[in-house]
Structure formats: structure tokens, C-alpha cells
Image: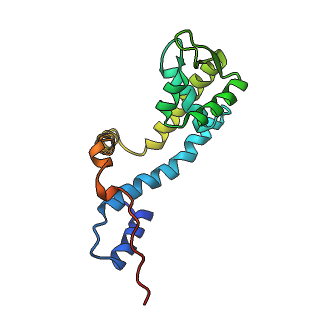
Amino acid sequence: MSVPLDAVDRIQAQWQQERPELSLQAMGILGRLRRCSVLYSPLLDNSFSKFGLTAWEFDVLATLRRSGTPYTLTPTELFSTLMVTSGTMTHRLKGLETRTLIERHDNQDDARNRLVTLSLQGLSTIDAAMTVHVETMEGILSGLNPADQEQLNRSLTQLLALLETPAVQSKPALVSKPLASPRKS
């Protein structure tokens, strides 16, 4: 069965016409990853909104939930896991605390910071939201057979491992350099 041309195919064809010397395979792969993210993100956001949550609120509650009983982490553990700044995390935690989805209390081991704990309301909210989230993700991938899903997962796991290596992050070609301005004729 042939797959119809997609938006990325059309972009690649335009570039191939204009710059035939360029290899466009990487553009196709990464372009499709980006396009997939753009298309599935609103579907996930919709599932979070059913519980009055945004994506980042879901992430905070899910991080606490998967940490296991007593569903407690330090703010540093949270912002490191979620890859946000401490200032951003402080602001986000205040909102979740106001909505009684989390509780903050003194840290007996370190008086400089307070612990963040999933409240009972937060626990029931994230458990319900997680069930719908998994159903949504399964629905998104339901058009792929199990073997294709497994192959996609293996390939993306390899790509992620590659991208997370310091060697890739330090390659000169991946570091932005200012380009010389094109000459005006």
C-alpha cells in the first residue's frame, strides 16, 4: 500500500528543486518528528483539559505520582526532572498549591527548601488524567500495527540516545555560528 505524499514530502520536493545538491533525508525525518509533535500536542492538551490541567500541570503531578509513596519531591528534583528553571517551578507550584493539588511542607533534612507532596485531590486527579492520557496516546498510535509501533519505538529510542550524548551536543556543526551575510549584487 502506498502512503500519500505529506507536507514534509512537498517541502523536500521544493528544496530538491531549488538545491538539488543537498541531502534531504535528515530534513524528512526530523521534519516529520516536528510535524507529528505539532499534530498530537493539541490532542494531549485536550485530554488534560478534561481535568482542568495544562500540560505542565499534568507533568508536575505525574512526576510526583510516579515517584511513589509518599509522592514527595524537593523543588530541585522537580525542576531538574521537568527541565525548567527554579523560578518557573516556584510560580507553577504556587498555582497547584492554591488549587489544592499539591501540599508544601518543611523539609526536616534541609531547612532551606520545602518538600512538595501530591495531595489526595491531586492524587485522584492525576490517576484519572493518566488513564485518559494513556488512552489518548494509544488512540493516536492505533493506526500503526504493533510491529510498526515497536519498530518506531526502537528507532526513536536510538535517536534519543544519540541526541542525549555529549559528543553530539558538542559537534561544531550543531553549534550555531553566525553566517556571513550574502553579498548584494
Q: Would residue 1 be visible to someone looking at this image?
A: no
Q: Which residue is at a point 56% across and 33% down the rendered structure image?
A: 86
Name the residue at the front extreme.
112
Name the residue at the bottom extreme.
185
Q: Which residue is at a point 46% across and 37% down the rendered structure image?
A: 138
Rendering coords of residue 133 (x, y %): 53, 33
Rendering coords of residue 62 (x, y %): 53, 27
Question: What count of labels does the image hold?
Answer: 0
Q: Quadrant of the C terminus?
A: bottom left
Rendering coords of residue 43 (x, y %): 56, 44
Q: Which residue is at a point 27% across and 75% down the rendered structure image?
A: 21
Asked whether, in this view, residue 183 is left or right of residue 20, the answer is right
Task: Give the colour scheme of this rendering.
Answer: rainbow
Q: Nearer the viewer, residue 160 or 83?
A: 83
Asked whether, in this view, residue 113 is left or right of residue 134, the answer is right
Rendering coords of residue 57 (x, y %): 61, 33
Q: Judge whether 66 appears above or below 23 on screen.
A: above
Asked whether, in this view, residue 59 is left or right of residue 91, the answer is left
Q: Which residue is at a point 58% across and 32% down the rendered structure image?
A: 58
Asked whether, in this view, residue 20 is left or right of residue 105, the answer is left
Q: Nearer the viewer, residue 46 or 80?
A: 80
Q: Judge whether 130 appears above or below 31 on screen.
A: above
Name the residue at the right extreme.
98
Residue 111: which quarter of the image? Answer: top right
Q: Nearer the viewer, residue 149 or 52?
A: 52
Q: Would residue 138 be visible to someone looking at this image?
A: yes
Q: Judge whether 172 appears above or below 138 on screen.
A: below
Residue 89: which quarter of the image? Answer: top right
